[in-house]
């Protein structure tokens, strides 16, 4: 295994849906296929996170054949580390208190160099007396005092992307550490060198890369993967219960069926005859990567050497988990970014 690591970092506020699992599979294949370690992290700072969701998420990921290196990191156990990072920045004059509400920010006059959605700097230069007056009324958020207006990152799929950087939040007014800070600190702590995640987070990468530089942390290589969409055209969410958790696994006949479905969506496998994806009891439900020239039975070969047909590859239960692990191993061995069909997918 070469130096460096990839990772997957879900938020345990619901069961993982098909889009989450697809991104996780790509992250896993990219790391293992590139000879990297693979880390797991639970981003559980949100008040909606629950232990039972965390347990089910980890179970679902493991059932697809994912094996991570080292213990699972939990953000809720690292609050002192985040506060230490904020203190380091504050000691260099790179933070300030902000008393703005979301409405204040939306309604504030905005200079031409502040794109929509960025913070206009309302509280950046408040005097000490005004800060004391406002602090007596409401607790402040802590913002980064950015010294640049833009920062470029390298993304494997999007190329070089030059993004706006504003005075973004490091700690919210309710005391919760912001995602942009926690993810940067945690990636460095886990030795992560490649971040593969959904492309809805591409817009945050410039801020995170800039913050990493301020903290003296090594840059990462990003790969922002297109999302999965519902038939209505909106991206999948926790509302799509039929495409999440037990309902998803049951509909595909178990873990191997879910993994085969994801593999087909990435161009790593295809239904027989190029038609619609086969049902969970069909022998064509698991199909070999076309370019490799191997058949469904070999894709999920029984480790004991016993004979069985491809239909069993998508049945639930323990055997389905074993078959998913074998199929995942085959996908890792053949993974190549250049052959990946990674566009948006409608489930």
Image (cartoon, rainbow, N blue to C red):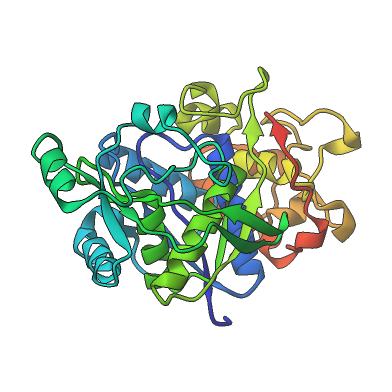
Q: Is residue 105 above or below residue 93?
A: above
What is the residue that sits farthest to the bottom in this orientation?
2
Q: Nearer the viewer, residue 52 or 299?
A: 52
Visible in this render: residue 268? yes
Visible in this render: residue 255? no
Residue 239 relative to residue 142: left or right: right
Q: Residue sitting at 73 percent across and 40 percent down?
A: 265
Where, by quadrant of the figure, is residue 346 drawn? top right
What is the residue that sits farthest to the right in this orientation?
273
Q: Which percent across, then down, holds residue 284?
A: 79, 37
Residue 37 relative to residue 269: left or right: left
Q: Nearer the viewer, residue 74 or 151?
A: 151
Q: Is residue 69 above or below residue 195?
A: below
Q: Which percent across, then down, holds residue 282?
A: 74, 32
Q: Which percent across, then down, holds residue 122?
A: 35, 42
Q: Quadrant of the C terminus?
A: top right
Q: Nearer the viewer, residue 220 or 292?
A: 220
Q: Which percent across, then down, holds residue 289?
A: 81, 53
Residue 48 relative to residue 115: left or right: left
Q: Is residue 202 above or below residue 181?
A: above
Q: Residue sitting at 40 percent across and 58 percent down?
A: 183
Q: Residue sitting at 44 percent across and 53 percent down?
A: 9
Q: Quadrant of the N terminus?
A: bottom right
Where, by quadrant of the figure, is residue 172 drawn? top left
């Amino acid at each position: 295994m070469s130096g460096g690591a990839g990772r997957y970092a879900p938020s345990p506020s619901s069961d993982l849906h098909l889009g989450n699992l697809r991104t996780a599979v790509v992250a896993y294949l990219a790391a293992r296929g590139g000879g990297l370690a693979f880390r797991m992290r639970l981003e559980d700072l949100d008040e909606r996170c629950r232990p039972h969701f965390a347990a089910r998420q980890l179970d679902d990921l493991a059932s697809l054949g994912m094996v991570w290196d080292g213990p699972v990191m939990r953000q809720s156990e690292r609050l002192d580390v985040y506060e230490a990072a904020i203190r380091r920045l504050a000691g260099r004059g790179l933070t300030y208190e902000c008393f703005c509400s979301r409405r204040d920010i939306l309604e504030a006059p905005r200079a031409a160099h502040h794109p929509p959605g960025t913070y206009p700097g309302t509280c950046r230069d408040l005097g000490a007396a005004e800060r004391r007056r406002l602090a007596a009324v409401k607790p402040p958020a802590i913002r980064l005092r950015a010294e640049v207006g833009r920062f470029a990152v390298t993304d494997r799929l999007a190329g070089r992307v030059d993004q706006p950087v504003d005075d973004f939040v490091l700690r919210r007014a309710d005391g919760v550490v912001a995602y942009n800070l926690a993810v940067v600190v945690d990636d460095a702590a886990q030795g992560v060198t490649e971040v593969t995640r959904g492309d809805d987070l591409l817009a945050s990468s410039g801020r995170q890369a800039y913050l990493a530089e301020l903290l003296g942390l090594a840059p990462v290589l990003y790969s922002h993967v297109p999302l999965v969409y519902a038939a209505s055209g909106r991206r999948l969410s926790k509302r799509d219960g039929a495409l999440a958790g037990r309902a998803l696994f049951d509909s595909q006949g178990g873990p191997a069926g879910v993994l085969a479905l994801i593999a087909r969506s990435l161009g790593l496998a295809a239904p027989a005859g190029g038609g619609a994806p086969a049902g969970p009891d069909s022998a064509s439900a698991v199909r070999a990567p076309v370019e490799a020239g191997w058949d469904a039975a070999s894709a999920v070969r029984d480790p004991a050497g016993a004979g069985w047909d491809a239909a069993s590859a998508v049945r639930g239960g323990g055997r389905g988990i074993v078959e998913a692990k074998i199929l995942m191993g085959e996908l890792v061995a053949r993974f190549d970014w250049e052959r990946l069909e990674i566009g948006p997918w409608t489930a």
